[in-house]
């Protein structure tokens, strides 16, 4: 099930809301757990067992690690941790990467091993990372093992973040799992975040996605320069509003049930370097790799050569995490290399030149990265890049490009503004201005919110196009 | 900080909206057919172990929820208003064209070149087989070809001229009846519906005149007809597809010959027999174009009071439905075959029914994409 659906909004959500708030506090985790299992099983009626299995594995391993550590048997604790890693990564590897591996072995050795053609279990890349962080944190002594299977199950299956993150680390919500207090204030904040996320997804991402799907359907080598640039801009907007909209909805829903998740996006397209971009894009994934891969490898503390090695490893993994295909490997390496170059000398210059140039630099590099990300075939990637640089016969601009441009101009302007913190700053300014006029403020604010909600519902009722990009990961 | 008034209003209004909409959805009666969209709505799926495990159940259930959402039409209308405000020029492959026209968008990728080539070859084989008849082929261009100046600026469309020229050049000369010139001369005379992908009765009449000229026949002239509007409230297929709320309805005209002619119309070998070419009951429904010869039927035979011994076979798509009422006056028998539902041998049918004339009539896009063209040479 996805949040941006009528089924979720008008059946699942009201029922869980009612049940949750009618029930006594001690049953609330159980209710969340049961509904979350149902939420997942709706889209994955079989693989839900896999998620429950993964939950049980880390629940038992976590408990064991803690016991062994308490009795001073560090070596044994390490072995148990290793076992948890092997099982989690084994599941992820088997379901996500076996066909990629088989395909490449076939190609390399000229064999013909049949592919398994397994469907990727929804959200497996997200929940295996969460459960791994749990056992690791216990081993490190940064978290206490959860003794209650329901509370732990609630953490893993918690429907707001189950399918597409943010990747919530156990230690950030360990306390809230047993000890949270829902409030009207937090609930209303949750509603606002949810509606804004819904609008980003349904009104912005889906609409600009229509443009990208038209352009990506055309032959990459036959695009005029303008069409190619509009196309990749459209994709950049689609993936940002799709994913950050989903994160907003997740954070908002979390708030409605008393949870505080960490932020996942912070206006990435406003960055002044790629280093900064990755501090603002999919923050929970970056943090995860930093804490559980980069720093354990030695981070930047063991000399520059080792640091470069560590950066490359992290970005290779980040790339392949996004999908089992060579273009994602390439995409990860592309960022790894840019980040190393920035560290070496570019960052210094970026700080000295006027902001506008560092913004342009960042956005250009991000756009090229999306070309690699969007096509899983290197010929298409090369053709598309050629079209962007006018190296094809299609010229600088054609009627097609003009048509795409003027029929989407207003949408593109809205998207560009919404990618920055300008709307938020206007909102804050308005709040200050109207501080003494609570009634006016309430009306204006809620009018806008409800307007976005109603319009989103209208787009969902007539939805011929409502994909969700991060489902693949 | 304490809870503000604004927060309370947010919670109350959001929770109210969610619950009111879900409860009204729950208790509102189910409709099985949407007049506006001219289709059956998704049914509530049955709970079965197999469909649940395969994930089919949840998919079908979601379709059901979307199709049956309360006041569906009004929500769809709200969406289209917002699209207009965004200066969008198309929705769902329909252009919002000038002067209130909706025009269907066809792209190069919609036309499979190999399939088109197969259809052309079948057509050529068919004409070779039946060269002893009065043979004619008509491919009617759709509105995007004739009403180019009404399309949004720089809109990209499939080149129907190239398709028509190819077919025309590969057929023996004199067989293909080209209506493009006469259509272009009359492009401002309301020859295509604004909300539907068909030509108007006027468009069909122009095609009929062009056909008469090519066949060397003296057809009826416009002055020989009483031209009457039968519906001023026609919202066609393109309206349903584009969901453009502000669209104005079309008017449907009928051309009734002044000189009385009577008909006997037989649908599907006696399934239904009437004495009229127009099923006016459709005028009370959404699908008003089906008033012409009762919409899509596998086999329709029209016997007229014009006893001249000439029998015409029309192999066609729905563009023929408003065309055939004209030729029905010139033949003793007209047989209309829809290849989608026709399984007999064409050769045998022609022989058994003493066919003297054959017309193949499609719109260009249907001709290029029709998967049943092999029926021509069975």
Image: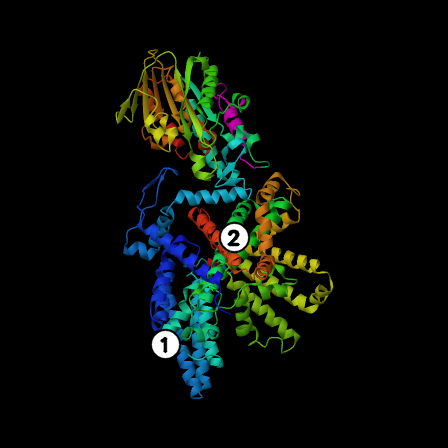
Chain to which the residue tagged by mark 2 belongs? A
**Residue A177 sits inside the magenta stretch:** no
Q: Which residues are magenta?
A: B155-181
User: Which residue is at the front of the view, A463 or B13?
Assistant: B13
Q: Which mark is residue B155?
A: none
Which of the pair A442/A258 is nearer the observer? A442
Query: In what element is the residue under mark 1?
Result: loop
Say above or below: A30 vs A301: above
Placement of A275 over or under A395, stated as above or below: below
Which residue is pictured at 66% across the width and 49% down the height? Answer: A389
- Label 1 marks a residue whose chain is A
Q: How far apart, in angstroms, are the residues tagged by discs 2 and 1?
A: 40 Å
**Residue A55: percent from left, percent from top:** 39, 71
Identify the element where label 2 is drawn. Answer: helix
Number of the label disc, if any, that sits on residue A205: 2
B171 inside magenta stretch = yes
Residue at the (51%, 45%) spot, across then down: B82
User: x%, y% of residue A68?
Assistant: 42, 85
> Which one is nearer the viewer's eye here, B103 or A417?
A417
Is A41 placed left or right of B150 in the picture? left
* Residue, disc 1: A148
Q: Is residue B373 left or right of residue A388?
A: left
Which quadrant of the view contains residue A347?
Answer: bottom right
User: x and y percent of residue A295 in the render?
Assistant: 57, 75
């Amino acid at each position: 099930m996805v949040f941006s659906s009528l089924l979720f909004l008008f059946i699942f959500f009201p029922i869980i809301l009612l049940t949750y708030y009618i029930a006594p506090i001690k049953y609330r985790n159980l209710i969340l757990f049961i509904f979350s299992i149902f939420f997942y099983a709706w889209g994955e009626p079989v693989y839900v067992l896999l998620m429950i299995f993964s939950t049980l594995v880390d629940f038992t391993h976590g408990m064991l690690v803690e016991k062994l550590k308490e009795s001073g048997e560090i070596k044994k604790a390490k072995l148990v941790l290793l076992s948890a890693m092997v099982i989690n990564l084994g599941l992820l590897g088997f379901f996500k990467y076996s066909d990629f591996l088989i395909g490449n072995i076939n190609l390399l050795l000229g064999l013909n091993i049949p592919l398994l053609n397994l469907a990727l279990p929804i959200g497996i890349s997200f929940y295996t990372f969460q459960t791994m962080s749990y056992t690791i944190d216990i081993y490190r002594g940064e978290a206490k093992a959860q003794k209650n299977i329901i509370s732990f199950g609630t953490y893993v299956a918690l429907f707001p973040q189950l399918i597409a993150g943010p990747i919530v680390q156990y230690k950030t919500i360990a306390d809230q799992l047993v000890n949270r207090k829902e409030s009207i204030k937090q609930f209303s904040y949750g509603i606002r975040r949810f509606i804004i996320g819904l609008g980003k997804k349904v009104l912005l991402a889906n609409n600009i996605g229509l443009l990208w799907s038209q352009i990506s359907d055309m032959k990459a080598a036959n695009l005029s320069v303008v069409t190619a640039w509009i196309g990749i801009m459209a994709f950049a907007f689609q993936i940002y509003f799709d994913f950050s909209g989903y994160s907003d909805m997740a954070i908002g829903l979390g708030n409605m049930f008393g949870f505080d998740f960490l932020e996942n996006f912070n206006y990435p397209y406003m960055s002044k370097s790629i280093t900064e971009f990755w501090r603002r894009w999919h923050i929970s994934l970056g943090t995860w790799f930093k804490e559980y891969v980069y720093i354990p490898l030695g981070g930047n503390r063991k000399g520059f050569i080792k640091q470069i090695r560590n950066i490359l490893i992290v970005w290779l993994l980040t790339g392949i995490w996004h999908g089992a295909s060579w273009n994602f490997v390439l995409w990860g390496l592309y960022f790894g290399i840019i980040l190393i170059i920035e560290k070496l000398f570019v960052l210094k210059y970026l700080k000295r030149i006027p902001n506008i140039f560092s913004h342009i630099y960042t956005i250009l590099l991000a756009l090229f990265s999306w070309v690699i990300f969007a096509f899983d075939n290197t010929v298409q990637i090369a053709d598309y890049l050629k079209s962007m640089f006018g190296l094809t016969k299609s010229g600088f601009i054609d009627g097609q490009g003009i048509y795409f441009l003027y029929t989407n101009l207003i949408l593109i302007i809205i998207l560009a503004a919404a990618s920055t913190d300008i709307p938020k700053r206007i909102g804050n300014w308005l709040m200050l201005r109207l501080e003494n006029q609570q009634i006016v403020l309430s009306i204006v604010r809620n009018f806008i919110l409800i307007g976005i909600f109603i319009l989103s519902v209208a787009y969902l009722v007539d939805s011929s196009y409502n994909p969700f990009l991060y489902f693949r990961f | 900080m304490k809870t503000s008034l604004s927060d309370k209003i947010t919670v109350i209004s959001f929770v109210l909206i969610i619950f009111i909409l879900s409860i009204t959805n729950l208790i509102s009666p189910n409709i099985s057919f949407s007049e506006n969209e001219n289709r059956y709505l998704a049914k509530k799926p049955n709970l079965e172990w197999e469909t649940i495990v395969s994930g089919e159940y949840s998919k079908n259930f979601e379709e059901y929820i979307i199709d049956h959402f309360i006041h569906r039409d009004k929500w769809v209308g709200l969406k289209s208003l917002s699209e207009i405000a965004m200066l969008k020029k198309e929705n769902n492959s329909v252009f919002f064209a000038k002067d209130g026209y909706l025009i269907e968008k066809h792209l190069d990728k919609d036309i499979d070149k190999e399939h088109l080539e197969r259809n052309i070859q079948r057509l050529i084989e068919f004409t070779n087989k039946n060269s002893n008849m009065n043979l004619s082929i008509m491919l009617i261009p759709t509105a995007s070809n004739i009403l180019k100046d009404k399309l949004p600026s720089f809109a990209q469309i499939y080149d129907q001229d190239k398709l028509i020229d190819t077919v025309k050049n590969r057929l023996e000369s004199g067989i293909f009846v080209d209506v493009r010139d006469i259509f272009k001369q009359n492009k401002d005379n309301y020859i295509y519906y604004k909300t539907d992908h068909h030509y108007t009765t006027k468009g069909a009449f122009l095609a009929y005149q062009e056909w008469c000229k090519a066949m060397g026949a003296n057809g009826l002239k416009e002055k020989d007809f009483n031209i009457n509007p039968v519906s001023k409230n026609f919202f066609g297929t393109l309206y349903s597809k584009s969901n453009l709320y502000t669209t104005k309805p079309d008017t449907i005209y009928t051309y009734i010959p002044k000189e009385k002619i009577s008909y006997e119309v037989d649908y599907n070998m006696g399934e239904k027999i009437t004495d009229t070419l127009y099923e006016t009951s459709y005028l009370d429904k959404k699908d008003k174009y089906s008033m012409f010869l009762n919409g899509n039927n596998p086999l329709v035979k029209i016997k007229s009071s014009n006893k001249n011994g000439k029998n015409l076979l029309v192999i066609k798509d729905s563009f023929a439905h408003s065309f055939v009422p004209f030729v029905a006056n010139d033949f003793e028998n007209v047989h209309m075959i829809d290849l989608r539902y026709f399984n007999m041998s064409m050769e045998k049918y022609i022989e058994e029914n003493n066919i003297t004339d054959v017309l193949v009539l499609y719109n260009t896009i249907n001709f290029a994409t029709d998967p049943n063209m092999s029926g021509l040479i069975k």
